[in-house]
Amino acid sequence: MSGLVPPDPGSASAVLSVRDLCIDYVGQKRVRAVDGVTFDLRRGEIFGLLGESGSGKSTAALGALRVLPPPAVIRSGQVLFEGVDLLRATEAELRRLRSARMSVVLQSAMNALSPVLSVGEQIADVIAAHEPGQVSQKRVGELLELVGIPADRSRSYPHELSGGMRQRVGIAMALALRPALVVLDEPTTALDVLVEREILQQVLLLKQTLGFSVLLVSHDVGTMLEFCDRLGVLYAGRLCEVATRAELLRGGRHPYTRALLAGRPALPTGPGHPEAPSARLAGISGTPPDLGQPPVGCRYHPRCTRSTERCRTEAPELVRLPSEGHLACHEPLALTEPTAPGAPLAAAEREVVPASGGHASVVLAVRSLAKMFRTSGRRSTPLHVVSDVSFDLNQGEVLALVGQSGSGKSTILRMLAGLEQPSGGEVSLHGEPMLGPGRKATLAFRKRVQIVLQDPFASLNPAHTVAYQLERPLLVHRMVQTQAALLARQQELLELVGLAPATAFLAKYPHELSGGQRQRVAIARALAVEPDVILADEPTSMLDVSVRMGILNLLSDLRRQRGLSLLYVTHDLASAGYLADRMAVLSGGSIVEEGPTARVLAAPRHDTTQRLLAAATHLASAR
Amino acid sequence: MTLVAALWRSRPARVGLAILAVFACVALFGPLFTRDARAFLAEPLEPPSADFWLGTTRQGQDVFARLIVGTRVSLGVGLVVGAVVVLLGSLVGLTAAYFGGWVDDVLSLVVNVFLILPGLPLAVVLAAFLESGPTTIALVLVVTGWAWNARVVRAQALALRRRDFVEAAVALGEHPLRVMVAEILPNMTSIVFSCFIGATTHAIGAQVGLEFLGLGDVSQVTWGTNLFWAVTNQDILTESWWTMLPTGLAIATFGFALVLLNFGIDEVTSPRLRIDPKYRALVGTRNGVLRLTTPVAHEDAALARLPT
């Protein structure tokens, strides 16, 4: 092997050893997605690559195994896998290693199964490709049972299995030939919170019995801290630091790591938690850089609170620390003392807000709301998605509707927004029926109730500018008379949601904005008509951790300043605990528990609440 | 605007647009500079000469003049039919996709009925029974051609209908017509444009075909009637190739230009094809095998020479 690499005490036991890996995406312009990434994956450990979207974490992991198709190009570096130089291996050599010694489970693995073959046949295919003649029904069945699927389901086709089960099949395929290394690329991001934990726990268990190593790629800080032995934190294509879980639980040494870890709402736990949603949490200001033109010096310096002249000019090198970790920072932080699980890390930054007055009036009253779908066909059974849901939303209140995916929470929101016809029940707004007949009544309702949807990448029309998106509600509802008033109002709205200078944003198209900025535009659009109620459908779930807090803070501020009522739909108890006055927990289309946030979190009564809370506290305690 | 700007960056589209521009100039101004296309000017079936660039017909008419004058009607009918077909198809497709339910059922039924009508035979029958002329031909081609476009637009609009930004516009209180035209339609310009090109190409071909069969007004000067007369006069037997070859080439060139433009649209809508030519060798297939392995620059001589 080449003498490029200085000897590293860890590398003797390394399964995968990556040195100075640089990967470009070549297209109309060249983008360096991974820049000088170095790490070792030791035998039997779970190593995590943590980063926000665009940080290069998936590119680094998949590129190192050379499973990324062009236009990704490995520019330089070295990758040793069990002593084999992967960057010098021929395609035939790589093909022999794949599945047999190293395998990959992709984020969309559950959608990567062929719909025309049974899952058993697909697992058998993997075995047959490498060990022809060794395929047996028994072996396939054993693999399925390994990942928690009954062996007789091998005859099932992918569409007959749930998303979680299909993802398990993907894992079974990856483990079919007992590889030494399994790369899990955001394996559970598309899954429900509870299913996600079950699957990762299963992988952890399998790792202990089968003894493979795992390279886990994710953006989810809580999950990573819970499951990884060591972690590499990536920012804008470069490694900030490599540290053990214990070190990261003590805050890490890099300012970016510290901010990432702090940028999650702490779940108020334990009985007698006094004040509910009243604090502000610190996010990270700014947005990740454009990799086409990365900043000079440390890539994090424009957003870093500790940056100095040196950080602006000289990029810090990744150096090995005495503790065997690696760090790339001129101004490292000292590790903090271990904090008690769930204790508010940013306690100093919390400001207490007086609770809203007691005599609240009901804005939105929902009574026995129901939604039923009929499948086509003569012997169809009606599917009750939502049944008998009743609640009140008071003036100036935040009510969180919490539930797993499939609990009917989004359907309720869509019915309240008038996007879906309820099959039963009543909704009244200020005591009047929700949607009267005719366009005039529709408009009157639309003016009072607005929505903010989950995916900011989908909720703004890509064909129109920000100015257009903000101008439509104002024109439709005849809120402005003159061109000058329109412009003034558009700027006012953008500044209200924290997009300044407003004039710079008006002419932009959605694709020129970051996810957080898009979500702010979507919120500004909802606010344009000065509604009484905003229905928010998981408004932060698609955003990066570093911008998530900013949006939550914005919603919290708007509620306080404008007396807005907010119906906040989420699966994340932590953010609901941060934002909401009251919570309603949904399961199977009905409300199973309702009450003040503090009470629900301190003393959950229903099984679903307890399980959601367990998932959330586990993540929170990992801080 | 962005589509046009992006198109201009694609070489096939530029070549296609240049050819189309030449045809457009010929159609608009060409007839001003040629001899009378109908007049009997010379001896029959003279081969190309300095006097008659493309020779003369059996009736002693100037083939070059007939080619130039015919361009106007042929292109005009093609473009009008393309535009009307796309307009009608988009309207029906969008309406069906936006409202869904019984509206979609009824419209889809109508579309399906028109789709299963055998296009060219019906066109022949209609053209034979209606008063002959370019308007009739255009009408016939619209009737037999719009349904396919409605189908394509409906499928695409259905995919967009459930997108969040459409829902957001509905929740905002936008009028349905506005949602269709201002929110959904701008996001399918490339497919609509593609439909327009397809419909135009088809219309020109079908029109020439119908006129060639004598179903147009044979006293008109168009590409199709030029071919009709060439065959009627049995020019092929006298080996007078100049009466048919120029028109055939014109039709082929025009179709070729439209196809090039369509390639350009493909490039614009599929970023994988928009890759820098320097790197194009990397993408797609090598030795007939789809490349799925990440190439390594410092292990690949051709790659190592590329700029970093």
Image (cartoon, coloured by chain):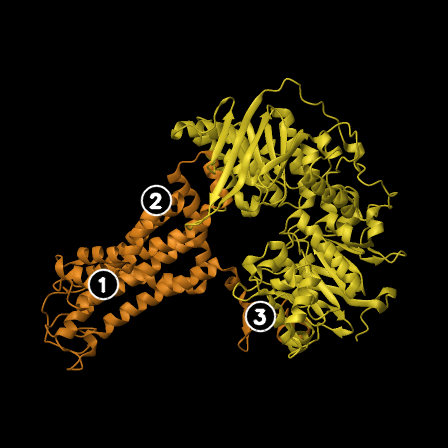
Is residue A597 rendered to the left or right of residue B17? Answer: right
Residue type, label 2: Val
Instruction: Farthest residue to the bottom: give it.
Output: B238
Q: Earlier in the sequence, mark 2 or mark 3?
A: 2
Which percent across, then down, holds residue A161?
A: 58, 57
Which numbered tag is attached to residue B103? Answer: 2
Asked whether the beta carbons under mark 3 and mark 1 sit within 8 Å of each other, the answer is no
Q: Earlier in the sequence, mark 2 or mark 1?
A: 2
Residue type, label 3: Leu
Which residue, given by chain and number where applicable, does mark 1 sit on? B207
Q: Colour of chain B?
A: orange
Q: Chain of mark 1?
A: B
Kindly indicate whether the residues beneath marks 3 and 1 are on one polypeptide chain. Answer: yes
Q: Earlier in the sequence, mark 3 or mark 1?
A: 1
Asked whether the beta carbons under mark 2 and mark 3 sit within 8 Å of each other, the answer is no
Which percent across, then down, holds residue B31?
A: 20, 60
Dot 3 lies on which element? helix
Cα–Cα gap, marks 2 and 1: 33 Å
Q: Which quadrant of the view contains residue A167?
A: bottom right
Which numbered tag is attached to residue B282? Answer: 3
Kindly indicate whether the residues beneath marks 2 and 3 are on one polypeptide chain. Answer: yes
- The answer to which of A132 and B209 lies nearer the viewer is A132
Residue type, label 1: Gln
Q: Which chain is yellow?
A: A
Which percent across, then down, holds residue A193?
A: 67, 47
